Image (cartoon, rainbow, N blue to C red):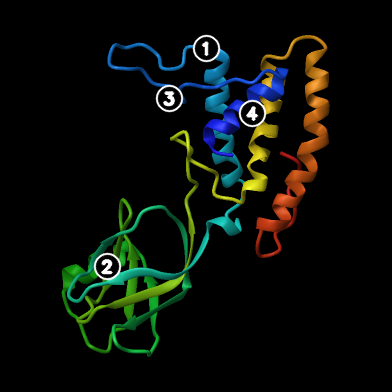
Amino acid sequence: MNFKEICESVLEESDGRAVQLASLSLGRDTAGDLYVTNPTHRNVIRWVQEEYQRIQLLSGNWEFHHKRGGFLNVAANRDEYNKRGVRRLAYESLYYIPSGGSARIPVFQQPYSWWQQQERVNTVSSSQPLNLIEGPVDEWIIWPIPTSAGVVYGEWWLKPQSLENADDEPCWDSYYHSLIKWNVLKLYAAEFAGEGSEAKLMARVNTMQPGLWAAFQRDYLINFEPPRPHL
């Protein structure tokens, strides 16, 4: 399911009536009118977006955020690079392979303040190791400046993604997309369900969500992190 279909599935599950959302934008058009005026629809859209990010933030070790391979394509005589969306980098995994070569050269971590000091002193020796420094606003710095092109390899984890466009999909496998629906229905039940209907809705949630959440953790939590409580 994509973003639009998840929102519509929440509304359909709540009372059995199919709903087709014309827009998922919570903003206004050029005339100042809301794209989505129904308050229930607005809440569901916002809850789906927030729930998607909340699940991603529950752990720093989700497998779907884990990347391994070429981290930076390095150009000769260039030291500063921009790479967005990096939540955490395993510095102990980093190595550099010059273009046309096969030798793996270790790359070490240094703080930004250390690099600032090197820039002040401006003394570079050919014997100095290659270092990677995380700068401000998604900036990454290689020091000393490589004299040849190559690739820095390693492992890293991505920052949480967001659902913005109607056809955006969660970053995990499609058979777990409905996890967002069942979690959002808890909020829906508390906010909108009337007398009697809340119990019926929560009965379906409590049947479907726990097993799905347990399987989701088994599939995606790496490093043998202990299971977390039900969402």
Residue drawn at x 46%, y 16% is 36
Amino acid type, residue under disc 3 in the picture: Ser
Circle 3 packing at 10 Å, graded few (<14), some (14-19), many (20+), is: some
Of callouts 3 and 1, the N-terminal one:
3
Q: How far from the left and from the top, in percent, is residue 190?
A: 71, 19
What distance separates the C-alpha of mark 1 from that of mark 4?
A: 16 Å
Of callouts 3 and 2, the N-terminal one:
3
Q: How far from the left and from the top, in percent, is residue 49?
A: 53, 33
In this rendering, is residue 138 above or below 209? below
What distance separates the C-alpha of mark 3 from that of mark 1?
A: 12 Å
Specify the quadrant of the image occupied by residue 63: bottom right
Of callouts 3 and 4, the N-terminal one:
4
| Front in this rendered view, residue 41 or 80 | 41
Q: Secondary structure at mark 3?
A: loop
Residue drawn at x 43%, y 22% is 26
Tell me the residue that label 1 is attached to.
Answer: 38
Tell me the residue that label 2 is attached to.
Answer: 115
Of callouts 2 and 4, the N-terminal one:
4
Of callouts 1 and 2, the N-terminal one:
1
Tell me the residue that label 3 is attached to.
Answer: 25
Q: Secondary structure at mark 4?
A: helix
What distance separates the C-alpha of mark 3 from that of mark 4?
A: 17 Å
